[in-house]
Amino acid sequence: RLPRQVTVVEVGPRDGLQNEAQPVPTELKVAFIERLADAGFPVIEVTSFVSPKAVPQLADAEEVMRRIARRPGTRYLALVPNERGLERALAAGCDAIALFTAASEAFSQANVRASIEETFERFRPVAERAQAAGLWIRGYVSTAFHCPYSGPVDPQQVLSVADRLFSLGCHEVALADTIGRATPRDVDRLLALATRAFNPGRLALHFHDTAGLALANVMVGLDHGITVFDAAAGGLGGCPFAPGAPGNLATERLLALLAGLEIETGVDREAVVAAVTELRQSVPGIGARAC
Ligand code: HMG
Ligand code: MG
């Protein structure tokens, strides 16, 4: 009943490093990303073309994209909030982007200073141009379970936002537990609806691990036929606009679970641990905000 193969999307360089108190030097980011690619990830989310005033930690997005040696077989994703971001991403040679919005109005305002409706107005020209340029497009639905400002989120609202992202042309939509508050029961409830409304093969799950339930939530996702899971090496991560959002699910823990279930990922767990250990040695205190 469980899938035989799963895609692990490594989001540490983006979701992890966007939340560090001090920006990580570009050369260390590049080395981290290259180490992760060598570990065998099919997808790595490397940076964001957002406002450098909003997220100074990722202000070197162009430089990172330019300097990484791209491994064939790895897709390098970058977040894009608007047309300006798309222009930057195209100029930097990106071939895969992620559009991000939310299921909660309050979080959308805090994160991108726009209503959910306005995010879709921003996305329309971005998606058209991205499709014309042949880019692969992911969509994110943040606060798919719980909003740090307005509390529990109605699954119907999540489905509606996901549907709009698919209609825009997103190849995959990630349902995100932004502050790591979802329980297995919440995940089961949403996926029972989402996997009926959409092709489960085009859904991804993005868990933060605040309450230590991310792996239990992954199990529920696997039971529902989900085959794409996000994680960050070392459990780095968090969104600066979501108070109480600490680390993402740690990739090495996800890989241990999947290996134990004999589910193939193509990723070398030891190499992931080595990559994050090297980063920690170079940047003492990294991930401290995630604890
Ligand atoms: P704004 O201030 O409302 O919009 O920002 P604006 O268009 O008026 O722009 C303000 C300034 O930013 C202007 O500069 C623009 O030129 C500049 P100024 O005139 O003041 O000098 N600007 C840009 N610069 C570079 N690249 C751009 C860009 N756009 C505008 N693309 C905006 C709106 C969305 C841009 C801003 O709020 C922003 O960048 N927010 C970042 C949000 C973010 O990155 N959040 C974290 C990622 S999402 C996340 O972590 C959740 C996820 O992990 C899933 C989950 O766990 O839930 C994905
Ligand atoms: Mg996140």
Image (cartoon, rainbow, N blue to C red):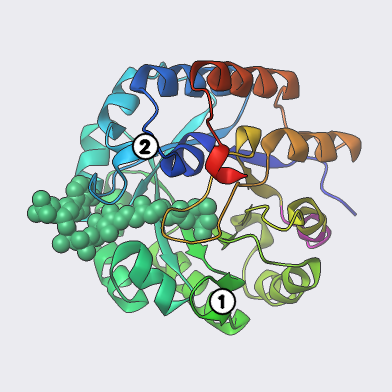
Residue 159, x across and y down, in percent: 56, 76
* Label 2 secondary element: loop
Which residue appears at 69% of the width and 23% of the height?
273
Distance from disc 2 to disc 1, alpha carbons, whole Å, reads 27 Å
Quickly name the residue at label 1. 159
- Location of the N terminus (image quadrant): bottom right
Q: Look at label 1 and name its amino acid.
A: Leu
Residue 14, x across and y down, in percent: 45, 40
Which residue appears at 28% of the width and 31% of the height?
60
Please tell me whether mark 2 or mark 1 is closer to you in this view: 1
Residue 95: give its label: 2
Q: How many marks?
A: 2
Residue 152, x across and y down, in percent: 61, 80
For the residue pair 202 and 60, the one nearer the viewer reads as 60
Q: Is residue 268 above or below residue 45?
A: above
Which residue appears at 36% of the width and 44% of the height?
135
Question: Which quadrant of the picture is home to ligand 1?
Answer: bottom left
Q: Earlier in the sequence, mark 2 or mark 1?
A: 2
Q: Look at label 2 and name its amino acid.
A: Asp
Residue 133, x across and y down, in percent: 28, 44
Per the rendered image, the range of residues in magenta is: 220-226
Residue 12 sits in quarter: top right
